[in-house]
Amino acid sequence: MSPADAPLDPPLDPRTHPYRDDIAADFLEGKVKSKSFVPGRECRLGTAQSAVMTKPVTANSNLGVMQASELLFGEAFTVYDESNGWAWGQCGHDGYVGYVAAADLYGNLAQPTHWVTAVRSLVFPDPKGEYPAMMSVSMTARVSVDKEEGDYARLASGGWMFRNHLAPLGETRTDFIATAQMFTRVPYLWGGRGGLGVDCSGLVQVPLAAAGIAVPRDSDQQAEAVGEDVEVPEDASKLEPGDILFFPGHVGFYLGSGAFLHASSHGMMVATHTLSEVLERIDERHGTGITRVRRVEITE
């Protein structure tokens, strides 16, 4: 076989590799084609949450642009290009690439010391929580604590948070199913990770992140990376509580006894349904059932 006939390497996934035809991250030089290669500028999100978009939103394009993910307060974002109010770059927590409103990104936030363990927690202007909240932050958001007073912690970025809603970076919550169940009745949001809502893969990513397990953003990526493969059983009773079940374009947690927890676009919220009900809807829509089972083992 001549070199010309040799199979080409598959292109790098643009969801997790920052490159476009006109610009790319400097560490990708020699691996992708682009007109220019640039170093990134490290920033952190300085608002409660911000959508990560597939393209920059303009007055003429807002209806055709999808939200791909969501950045939460204090999370890192590396900027490779900025124009017309949009920063294009890569999320630090999972490597996802997209566009974030440039005004929401800050280069001077203090390095985080803690992460938010509550589904949602409030930032107050006082250390007693007696005045109207300044901001609402979500689970796995990152903050820098510079002082503790009673039940509250003062943030370097301003404001006070209830101390029991925070944990030092590196401390984990290993019961990811219990964490996922905390999101029950949170609204469904395509691309959401809990700031304004959560989608099915976000409901898997965030509780596992709280358990100290970094997983990719999208369900197809998760099906290849989370835990270990388990053969899809013909009898659902063979599934174990905590198994992560994948379907075409969907994912969720098996709770045992025929119950399935997921962020459901059918009901537009996080809910527990019978697995048989979910399988019936999946079969009607896609003509298939469970496509993959992954099992996560966490040792204390």
Image: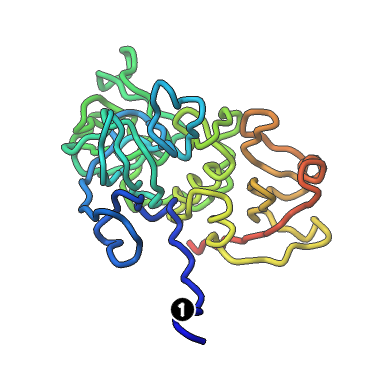
Is residue 120 in view? yes
Q: Could you say which is closer to the camera, residue 146 or residue 37?
A: 37
Q: Quadrant of residue 278?
A: top right
> What is the x, y in percent for residue 92?
33, 49
Q: In which quarter of the image is residue 297?
A: bottom right
Mark 1 closeness class: few <14, some 14–19, many ≥20 residues within 10 Å: few
Q: Could you say which is closer to the camera, residue 44 or residue 143?
A: 44
What residue is at 44 percent from the left and 39 percent from the top? Answer: 54
Which residue is identified by label 1? Answer: 4
Q: Describe residue 280's horizontal placement relative to residue 180 as left or right.
A: right
Q: Describe residue 127's horizontal placement relative to residue 140 as left or right.
A: left
> What is the x, y in percent for residue 286?
76, 46
What residue is at 43 percent from the left and 55 percent from the top? Answer: 212
Q: Describe residue 10's horizontal placement relative to residue 133 as left or right.
A: right
What residue is at 39 percent from the left and 42 percent from the top? Answer: 98
> What is the x, y in percent for residue 150?
27, 29
Q: In this view, does 200 lie above or below 47?
A: below
Q: Which residue type carries mark 1? A: Ala
| Element type where label 1 sits in the image | helix
Q: Is residue 179 above or below residue 129?
A: below
> What is the x, y in percent for residue 186?
56, 29
Give the colouring mode of the picture: rainbow
Is residue 46 in view? no
Which residue is situated farthest in the left direction here?
Answer: 108
Q: Could you say which is closer to the camera, residue 27 or residue 148?
A: 27
Q: Describe residue 221's horizontal placement relative to residue 39 as left or right.
A: right
